[in-house]
Image (cartoon, rainbow, N blue to C red):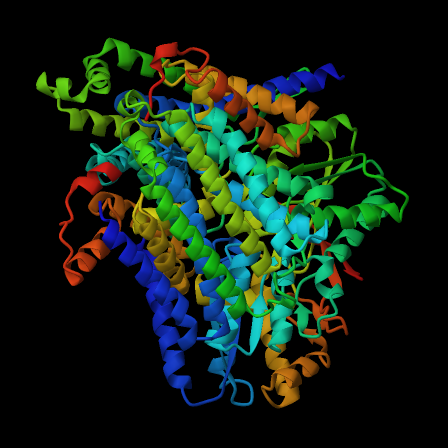
Amino acid sequence: MDIQIVMQQVISGLAIGCIYGLIALGYSLIFNAVDVVNLAQGSFVMVGAFVYGASFVRSYGWPAFPAFAGLIIVMAVFGMVCEFFFYRPLRYAHVRTKLVALLALSMLLNNLALIIWGPYPMGLEGPFGTKVLSIKGATILYQNIYIIAITILLLILQFYIFFHTTLGKVLRAVAQDKDTASLMGIEANQAVSFTFAYSSILAGIAGMLIAPVFTIGTGLSQLGFMGFGACIIGSFTNVSGALIGGIILGLFEMFSASYISSLYKSAIVYLLIIAFLLMRPQGLLGKKEEVSGL
Amino acid sequence: MLFGKRITKLITITVLTLLVVVSSAGAATFKLGGLANLKSGYGQSMVSGTALAIKEINAAGGVDGVTFSIDWQDTESSAATGRMAVQKLIFDTKIDALIGCHGSTVVLAVEGLIAENEIVEMAMGSASQVTQLGNPWLFRVREDDALTAKVLANFTVNELGLTKIAIFHMSEQYGVGGKDNTVAALAEYGVEPVAIEAHNQGDVDFSSQLLNIRQSGAEAMILYSGIPDIGILIKQARQLIPGIEILSSSVGATAPAMDVAGEAGNGVYAVVSYSEDNPDEKVQKFVQAHVEEFGVKPYDFFDPLAYDAVYLLAEAIKIAGSTDHAAVRDALHEIQGYKGATGLEYYVQPNGETINELLLIQIQDGKHQVVDTIKG
Amino acid sequence: MFKKERNIALAIIFLILIITPIFDRAPYHIFVLNMVAINIILVMALNFILGFAGQVFLGTVGFYAIACYSTSLLTVNYGLSFWQAVPFTIIVTSILSLILGLPTLKLKGFYLALMSSGFIYIVLDILRNWKSFTGGVWGIMGIPRPFIGTTLVRSDLHFYFIAITITLCLAIFAVLIEDSKFGRAFKAVRDDQLSSEMLGINSHMTKVLAFVMCGIYTGFAGSLFASLQGFVSPEMYTFELNATYMCMLVVGGLGSVPGAVLGATVLTITTELLRFLREKYLTFYALLIIIVLIYMPGGIITYVYQIIGRLFSLKNKPSQKEEINVR
């Protein structure tokens, strides 16, 4: 086989894998704080892309930096609003009730986006346009390199916040035992609210970054499943698991589609995720006893 | 700000509709049923196209005093829901004619119902099967996939002189039908595609398929895909397969597709039934009326096609001199050479086909440049 | 807990469903009634897993698609009659649910949610792309209607009587299961897996049983749907369809058979009434799920129980207990 093509496959797989990893970052955060997977995370990414791309940049014509600042504020408020209206009333409910509610939230957001922004998908010009970096015939979009850099940056930031700040300690305390945490004077509600805000900001940044590569449209919310899969392959509890899981998923998708069948691409990818769920549900980087659920 | 414009628009439309309903009470009304996936851009284009046509016709006092009204139903792009919706239209709304659906699956699923209840259907599904059914009540205001395929194959092989051709299609009816037709059309020139790749609707990453095409050594690539997939696909194709000629069915030349593709769209050829950059007077008049009414240009070809479908029915009522379903159906067949807002002339064939000419265009900076007009 | 209320509620709903065609025979309305019957079966199927066993399984539409396709393939390609195809369809779906149930029930909570949605995508990929077997994107046409004796059931009205009879039998069966020791085992596992295991309940087998019941019920629903429509194609089965069934169950009442029946009936009809909302009705559904989960976790059936309790002056007062269990 052609070495150039293989190199291109590796690079493209890495690029898409990092996008999955970026989306996965938001999942692990909420999971660590409240022990629930935010099934609406993909829709949060979509909302981020719409708010930044469709409203701020395209409709209002804001330049990149104010639009970015606006996005952070909007997404933080959005995350808190979602937590306040859809999560908080159910915080003592069973996990399965929360999951159904979050699923409904994702459905609500997708349909609202259609009503607010219309059914026509939109393109977005990234800071680097469609310029590509070419290494011996294999090409990668500058936008993808930008995504990889920011993902790693966010990963370090998340690691730092979680293990080296008081805030991180609070979050971890709440995750372990809400009641004890509140006895020790930690405002559990505020901590959870903050977690939602932060993970919604992460989703917003993901939306902003991937919109130029793909499109601004409701289809983006489907990427949420891939982010979820990345967490399962990596680990929900290990911060760097998201990125590693994402890259494995991206490379696997690329090579299985190239050498097995591109028709059954999504089926094969789901089979991999299911295989991981059955054989190693804690993920590659997780510890065995961490698996908990219903 | 996010809601303001839309809500105002919604209120205006509601008030206008109410006014129309009130003012037209008493006069004879020709009730249309609309059938589309209203969550898609295609569906919304059909809604605005028909709304414009109906408003114009009614403002002029109707056709021989007959005014139009329309009731839209959502198919959710599922044949089962579509069938339910058609039953509602036929038995509850008691429609006289049906506009849509844009999906061939739905058209095929409901054709029995419309024949049984004697409703004229102006279908917009492009699958070749639609007009092969022999259903006398079924008309198609859209190009046949086979015609698109023929034009694309002829242009690639004879004009561009390329024979290493790959086909990339979406794995639903539009894409698979387009692929089958193109394979057949290419076979007439003795050309076999070097690669056939597919993707699922809603996919965002096409790099593995594109790399397979690159490995096959294809010089040209024919696309049958959907919105927004095709825009992303063209972008990724330009990055991964430098120098390949990209040709597309009409979807690739719609405004949202070009918007998503951006610069990457430059140089893409497409076969279309309508181009807003067509200098034709009728087309420009339509675009201008659309901007005045809705504030935006039509997004895709379904807008003028749906507009024309209403006018074709109006024309038929005029010829028939009545709104009797069978009379309107027979009168439709007498329409030959009606010039529509698409810029095409409609010749109604005995099998219900109305379009027999297409434009071949090339995209340049988000605009269409008409390369050729091809008669089938 | 509310056995009397439950039985009365079921009797009333089915009575209304059965006598409606006497007053209203508009073809469209009869067709909607047929869909009501089929949706009731599907929502009862979902109720076994989500309501009784408490597992967040999102793959019902996958089973449903397989059921529709197996009836279609058996009748169209292998020349079986409708009544011959039904048992085979049920065997296919229940075996599949067994295969799927055995390993996946070790998974908990959101893992099962992801895995089951993956299952839908896998099924759809196969239906779309395995052209020689499933007919690919064009689906399968010409699925026959059932025979009764030697007469073909052509009219939707007569089909409705078959569908509603099957639905009624399945509802009675579901109630019997709920009252049996299996039903109690389901709920014990749902409410507290650990203590139920200490009581000697095999929680794993209980969940698998819930899965198989779900498979059997979707088998019936799929057979009826394929025969009613006369055609199947892959684009009919979407993730959103799954969400609507979940909405029906949650709104009706999770873990309650009349709740499932009521939810399916009310929301199928409401969807038709709300067609003027057109593409926006799913927004309404999503909001409805969340509101019901927060403000009336037992679903509308709890209010129906209260009314029935008062009308028939039954003794046991509705307590909060049921609601807490559901949550």
From the top left corner, tell me how far across and down residue C239 is, in percent.
Answer: 48, 43
In the displayed structure, would residue C241 be above or below residue A157?
below
Instruction: Determine whether, in the image, residue A147 is placed left or right of residue C126.
Output: left
Image quadrant occupied by the N terminus of chain A: top right
From the image, which quarter does the C terminus of chain A lie in?
top left
Instruction: Name the residue nearer the viewer: A70 or C149.
Output: C149
Determine if residue A34 is in view: yes
**x and y percent of residue C273 in the render?**
38, 65
Residue C36 lies left or right of residue C125; in this view the side is left
- Residue B134 in picture, x, y percent from top left: 75, 69
Q: Give left or right: position of C40 versus B251.
A: left
Front-lying residue, B358 or A101: A101
Q: List x then y, in percent, for residue C320.
A: 15, 42
Outermost residue on the right side: it is B190
C126 left or right, relative to A161: right
Q: Quadrant of residue A236?
A: top left
Q: Nearer the viewer, residue B259 or A20?
A: A20
C60 relative to C200, above or below: below
Q: Does residue B299 appear in the picture of this structure?
A: no
Name which residue lies at 39% across and 65% down: C17
Give the residue displayed 33% in from the left and 56% down from the top: C262
